[in-house]
Image (cartoon, rainbow, N blue to C red):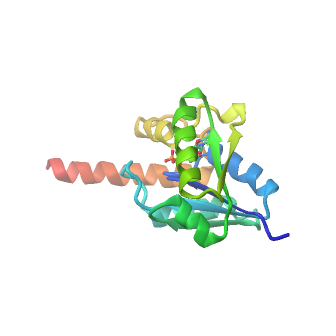
Amino acid sequence: MGKTIAIYPGSFDPVTRGHMDIIERASKTVDHLIVGVLVNSAKSPLFTVEERVALLKQVTAQYPNVEIRSFDGLLVDFARASGAHILIRGLRAVTDFEYELQMAQTNRVLAPDVDTVFLTTTLEYAYVSSTIMKEVARFGGDLSSFAPPEIIQALCKKMQEEKEKNKENIL
Ligand code: ADP
């Protein structure tokens, strides 16, 4: 039998403990896990794709079968090009479900040989999202439960840079 290769796609802007939990668990169930960082996110990301990839690499260095790569375009095309037949997604709450179901069904129509597997979030991280983490960071809140120290440091630095930029624009 060939190796099981899976892709865990997302924006990861930046990576959170919730993402890391899914990465750790998924990496135990497949031979090779590719974390796919979306280049052209509709969400106009705070971090560049290079920065998001670098941060993910830092916090997943301990997993030998996890690889971080960026991708653009259709996820199923990236999956095919990578030899992956499994897509991993995390489900936090019912609110995630409708969108995730629609996406999984769309991908299945586009690529019948690629299946989506959902991992439900660990309760401890159910409330964690990159968006909420950025909100808390913007107002100087405690971020230790959202992400490891190296990510928090990068986020605080980025927020500071954004503030300086905004100041220049106002002046
Ligand atoms: P997207 O921009 O596609 O929503 P994200 O970077 O926000 O991507 O998330 C990527 C994947 O990680 C999604 O499947 C999302 O449901 C999952 N995810 C995000 N946060 C958590 C969490 N706290 N627990 C479990 N899964 C999560």
Instruction: Determine whether, in the image, residue 116 is placed left or right of residue 1.
Output: left
Q: Residue furthest left?
A: 171
Q: Which residue is drawn at 37% across and 50% down?
A: 42
Q: In which quarter of the image is residue 66?
A: bottom right
Q: In which quarter of the image is ligand 1?
A: top right
Note whether 25 is above or below 49 in the view shown: above
Instruction: Determine whether, in the image, residue 72 is placed left or right of residue 69.
Output: left
Image quarter where the N terminus lies is bottom right
In the rendering, at what x and y percent does residue 109 appear?
Answer: 55, 52
In the rendering, at what x and y percent does residue 113 appear?
Answer: 66, 59
Q: Which residue is drawn at 44% across and 62% down?
A: 39
- Nearest the viewer among 74 and 20 is 74
Q: Residue furthest right?
A: 1
Number of labels in the image equals 0
In the rendering, at what x and y percent does residue 33 appear?
Answer: 70, 62
Note whether 142 is above or below 59 in the view shown: above
Q: Which residue is drawn at 53% across and 56% down?
A: 110
In the rendering, at what x and y percent does residue 118 appear?
Answer: 68, 43
- Nearest the viewer among 62 and 122 is 122
